Image (spheres, rainbow, N blue to C red):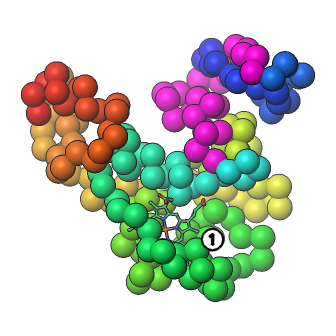
Amino acid sequence: MKRVDIFARSRSHGIVCLHEGARAFQSLPQERYTGIMTQPAMLAALAHSSDTSYVFRGRFVRKRLLCQEIGTPPANAMAEFANLMKPANPTAREVATVVEAQPACGGCHNLIDPGGLAFEHFDAMGAYRDQYATGKAIDTKGSLAAVTVTGSRGGRAVPGGTLSAGCEFLRPYRISTDV
Ligand code: HEC
């Protein structure tokens, strides 16, 4: 079991009725919660208030963990998104598939989305779920394309390319290893 820090006023991790701003520690299964991305606070911070955002989570993976620039979305992206045909009660995967198929969108979203879809088993509060409330299955499969590795230090892969601004996690590592 992994002991995680939960900021909560929520029942989502079996914690009932904490004061606002209170903190609690809860043991969660280590095979599901491991590393920084599955910290409930992290999953919740990279989500909308009541729904996940595979884009926010995927953007974090791409920019902050892999240190790659992905640019800013075009100003008309949300208007274009509203006009796209989507299935009823779409899953994150179904939405991503529609967006990625658009020539104006796929260049970025093929890079962003897989890293976020991988965490779809965790809802907007970071609680684990087996399926969506609609009964639809969760599909987390995918691959992180265009990750260049220039070498390894101490058995750890070293990413290549230009570091994105704000790459807090890997920058100290890269500086300390003079990569
Ligand atoms: C240059 C890269 C880029 C392109 C091109 C792009 N996007 Fe995005 N998109 C992003 C990023 C990055 C975000 C995350 C929000 C932000 O950084 O502003 C985002 C966010 C979104 C969101 C909001 C996701 C959420 O959970 O709130 C939607 C929907 C979206 N894009 C759809 C589209 C569509 C549709 C197109 C094509 C018309 C498109 N995007 C083109 C990079 C891109």
Q: Is 130 situated above or below 156? A: below
Determine the residue positioned at 52% across, 48% down. 57
Relative to the observer, which residue lies in front, 78 or 129? 78
Determine the residue positioned at 83% across, 61% down. 134
Q: In which quarter of the image is the N terminus?
A: top right
Residue 29's spot in the image, x, y percent? 65, 24
Relative to the observer, which residue lies in front, 174 or 27? 174
* Left or right of 94 on screen, residue 175: left
* Left or right of 160 on screen, residue 36: right
Q: Give the range drawn in magenta.
A: 21-47
Magenta-span inclusion, residue 22 = yes
Residue 139's spot in the image, x, y percent? 61, 58
Q: In which quarter of the image is the C terminus?
A: top left
The picture quadrant where one finds residue 178 is top left
Determine the residue positioned at 72% across, 53% down. 51
The picture quadrant where one finds residue 64 is top left
Crowdedness near tag 1: few (<14), some (14–19) or many (≥20) residues, C-alpha within 10 Å: some
Looking at this view, name the residue that lies furthest to the left.
178
How many numbered tags mark residues here?
1
Q: Is 41 situated above or below 79? A: above
The picture quadrant where one finds residue 125 is top right
Tag 1 residue: 94
Determine the residue positioned at 53% across, 57% down. 55
Under tag 1, what secondary structure? helix
Looking at this view, name the residue that lies furthest to the right.
17
Relative to the observer, which residue lies in front, 8 or 123? 8
Magenta-span inclusion, residue 25 = yes
Q: Can residue 67 be seen in this view?
A: yes
Distance from mark 1 CB to nearest ligand 1 atom below 8 Å: no
